[in-house]
Image (spheres, rainbow, N blue to C red):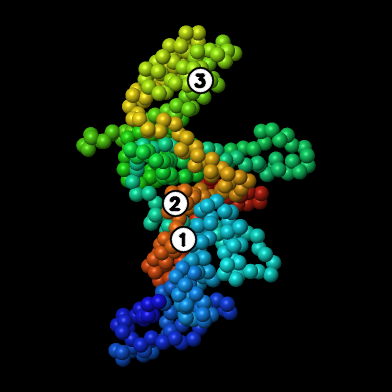
Amino acid sequence: MAAVVCTRPGHARSKVVRDGLYGTPGHKRQQYRCTPTNGDPEHRFTPVLPRLCVHGGERCLECEHVMSKDEGPQVPRTYWYSARDITEALRAVGTGMSYIEAANNVRDRANRVWRVRRYHGQLMADWTEVYAPVLWADLKPTRVPERLICDSTPFKVTPTAVRRARRRSTADRRGSSVKAFEVCCVVGADPPFYQPELLALVAVPRVTQAAWEYVLGQLPPGRPLTVLSDEDNSLSNALPVVWPNDPVTGEVTPTFQMCVWHLAKTYRDKAAPLVQRQNVDHPVWAKLETAFRSPQEWRDFCVVARADGGVRVDRWLRRLNRETRVAQQLAATPAGAPRSNRAAEAQLFWLRGRWAGRSGSYRNAERTNRLLQLYVLHRRGVDDPRQYSLVIRRHLGHSNGVADAPRVVTDRGAKPGPGQRVRSSLRA
C-alpha cells in the first residue's frame, strides 16, 4: 500500500504516523497524526477514503498480500460498508437479484447481522439511486450503431381492490390485472457480423411518440441508418423529431423498417381469409415462408395471396403501404443484417423473468430507470467488480470521500390527504 500523505497544502512531506482508531467495534478505522516540517502545528487527519482495520495476518483476496492493520478495504465516510461491498451488491442487483436478497447478502458479508433479520431492501434501493448514475456515466455505450432494433413490453399489476376481493373469494380472476407501465428496449447492430448489443432499457408509463422521443434521446451521440421494429407508428413518428433531416451536413432521418416476423404473424392472424386458414396445404403458406428473402419472392407472395384473398388481403397490403414498403426494405437490407426485432425481444424476455412477481414495486420512473441502467451494464458484460470499484472510489475521491445523499429522487404531486397518495411517476 502507498504511504499515507497529509492532504493539507504544504504538508506533502510531513511526518505521518498512526494515531489511534475511531469508529464502532468491528468497524474501526485508522487515524493518523501529521507533524509538518514547515512549522505548522501537529494535527490529526484521516485519508479521503478511510480504510477499515483488519486483524494481523489477513491476506488480500485479490493478490494474497499479507495486510497490516491499516490496510483494510476503503470505505466512504459515514458508511458501514466498504467500496468493494457496494460494488459486489450493485453487481448482484444488475444480474436481476432482488433488493432484499442483495441487501441481506451484503449485511452478512460486512458483519452487520441484526438480532432479528430485517427483510427489506432499502439499503440497495439507496445504493442504486446514488451509484447507478456514476457507473452509467463511466461505462455506458459511447456511440450509436448503424442499425437499431426497438421493441417494448408492458408490465401489469393487480389493483389493491382486486387483491382484497380475491382474499374474500369474490373476484373474477379474468381480466383483473391492469397495465402499470412499459419498458422500451433499444438494441444496436453493426456490420459486418451485426452482433446485437444492448443500448438502453427505459421504463415509461405508456409507449407514445413522446416516450420514444425520450428513449431515443437518451442514446449516445450518433445517427443510425435504419430503425427496425414492429408496426409502431409512435416510433416511426418520433424518428424525424429526434433525427431530423439536416440540409447542411446532408444527414437524413433514419429509415424505419418493419419486423418481418410480425408481418407474417399479422397476416396469419388478421389478414388471411377463411378459405386459406381452413386449407393447411394452400400455396399461400409456402409462399409466406419464403416471402421475406428477396423483393421478388415478396411480390410472388402478394400475387398468390390476392388470388383468392379478395378485398380483405388487398386492404391489408395497402394499409401502411405494406406492398411497396416491404419490397423496398428487402432490397435495401444487406445480407446478414437483422430483419426482425428478435434481439430486442430476447432482452425484454430476460427482464420479464427477473421481474416476475415484483414489477408492481416499481413506481418511481427515475429510480426504476437507474436500476435498468445496472441491467444494461450487466447484459453488455461490463459489470466487472474491479472496474465498478475503481469507478466508485474515483467518484468518492472527487467528493472528499462523502457519498451523495440518498432518497432525493422522489415523486412530486399533490400533498397526500386522508385516503390519498402521491401520484407515481411510473403510472399513467
Select label 3 or label 2 by which is in front: 2
Mark 3, residues whose alpha carbon is within 10 Å: few (<14), some, or many (≥20)? some
Q: How far apart are marks 1 and 3 (CA)?
A: 48 Å
For the C terminus, the image quarter is top right
Mark 1, residues whose alpha carbon is within 10 Å: few (<14), some, or many (≥20)? some
Q: Which residue is drawn at 66% across and 49% down?
A: 419
Residue 381 tag number: 2
- Figure check: 424 above or below 310: below
Q: What residue type is labelled 2?
A: Gly
The kind of secondary structure element at disc 1 is helix
Q: Residue at x 50, y 37 (%)?
A: 345
Q: Distance between the residues labelled 3 and 2?
A: 38 Å
Can you give x and y, in whole percent of width and height, for residue 182 in the image? 52, 40
The kind of secondary structure element at disc 3 is helix
358 horizontally vs 404: left or right: right
- Figure check: 360 above or below 18: above
Q: Residue at x 37, y 32 (%)?
A: 336
Residue bearing mark 3 = 267
- Figure check: 320 above or below 47: above
Residue bearing mark 1 = 385
Asked if one can make out residue 11 in the rendered structure from this viewpoint, the answer is yes
Can you give x and y, in whole percent of width and height, for residue 311 in the image? 49, 10
356 horizontally vs 21: left or right: right
Can you give x and y, in whole percent of width and height, for residue 378 in the image? 47, 51
Residue 264 tag number: none
For the N terminus, the image quarter is bottom left
